[in-house]
Image (cartoon, grey):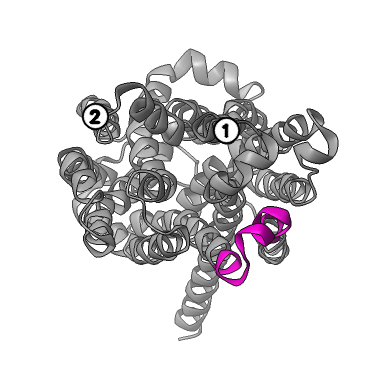
Amino acid sequence: MESHTNSQTDTRALDQTRRRGVLAAAVGTIVEYYDLTVYAYLAVVVSPLFFPGGDPTASLLASLAVFASAYLMRPIGGIFFGRLGDRHGRKRALLLSVLLMGAGSLLMAFLPVYESVGILAPILLVVARLVQGFSAGGELGGALTYVYETVGPKRKGLGASFVALGSNSGFALAAIAVGTVSALTTDAQMSSWGWRIPFLLGVPLLLFCLWTRTRIEDTPQFADSTTTVDVAKAPLTELLRTQSRQVLQVFGLGIAQNATGYMVLTYVAIYLVREGGYDRTQVTWMTALIIVLIALLMPVAGLLVDKFGSVPVAAAGLIGSGLLAYPAMSLMNGHGLAVAGLAFFVFALGTPLIQVATAPLFPSLFKSRVRLTGVALGFNLATIATGGTAAYIATWLIDRTGNSLSPAYFLLGSCLVGILTLLSIRTATYGGSRTLSASNAETVAPLSIR
């Protein structure tokens, strides 16, 4: 009887530890994506302040290029935080990444504009974005790795869905913050000082994230690796020597995930204002609502992953997104805001399927000793290609072709890359749906992808 009671107590303690770990990981992704995307939602306002000129399209492209510049630092940040996390612990990487993200956002909030300091203004803007990009390079890979190694073997999809929910919540909160400030200020006030407020509103989120992450322990797998001296001395070198194929698989899937995700979460709002001619504040609020609804569907997608596996769910999301891109964008222009919003929402339904399905799939492809480095490197390289650049590519395509629907072809091509990559993944490799044995041996686990 006493043994049974102790077993129940241990189970409750383990469940509490897992919930605390998932919360800490999810809150960090909220901070990351809030801080990264506030700038995107403010691009139309900020562009003339830092890149003045007679051509508004050129100013917007310059502003979007700065948005994309942060993503150039992500692979470098991924290598740095990957080494830190694989050698010194997942917790340490998670703490440092969110601290740097907060520092970059505070710098953004207090930047001088071009009218005050001239060319120094866009230079400082780029520096702030590079700091954010460097820290973001370790955040998502660290969060996915931490949750993957913390949650139970039958709930990897559901656990990872909260990381995806966190990232999308960051987008939603950014849209809400920008929409609220925009609604409460005039255009002149918004251009003068209002654009700084959303950056400052991220500070409470940062403090809460730090509090949650100081209360977690390192993952059992990393703790076991330190006791058995199974820590990689040079994670990047070992990764490229032994698991370069898996890095390419993460890269290929990341191409599709980032293209679909960033088009939904950052570009469509710009598209509706510039091409559809809709009111900026109304579009911002509608975008926030749609992103909230999509975020709420993340746990549902997680349950689907745990039931059917990552590959089928990801395939459904990729096929749906690819086929719906053109008709959805057609309905977003010239049919009224209600129709545009409905088309936006239906198209966005592929996002939770893709994001949640790949969340446990990425870390399952790597050995624990190089896992964080592998996920961070492959995903961040993909983010450069189609993540931070998605809005820029879409705007450029329309400007060059004169066809407002041309971004749909970019989405379709990206989805095809993802589907072809899925076909190259036959079975899970390392620890996909089983816990490690007492000896910390890596196990084949086909359940996670099927």
Residue 52 at x, y = what percent? 66, 34
| Other residues around mark 2 within 10 Å, as few (<14) / some (14–19) / many (≥20) | some
Q: Which region shows up in magenta?
A: 180-198
Identity of the residue furthest to the top in this view: 241
Q: Main secondary structure of the magenta part?
A: helix
Helix, strand or loop at mark 2: helix
Residue 90 at x, y = what percent? 63, 45
Quick check: can you spot residue 366? no
Quick check: can you spot residue 146? yes
Disc 1 target residue? 59
Apparent side of residue 79 relative to residue 429 in the rendered image (left or right): right
Judging depth in this view, the residue of 37 and 133 nearest the camera is 37
- Check the picture and name the quadrant holding the N terminus: bottom left
| Other residues around mark 1 within 10 Å, as few (<14) / some (14–19) / many (≥20) | many
Residue at 31% over, 47% down: 357
User: Residue 181 magenta-drawn?
Assistant: yes
Of tags 1 and 2, the one toward the viewer is: 1
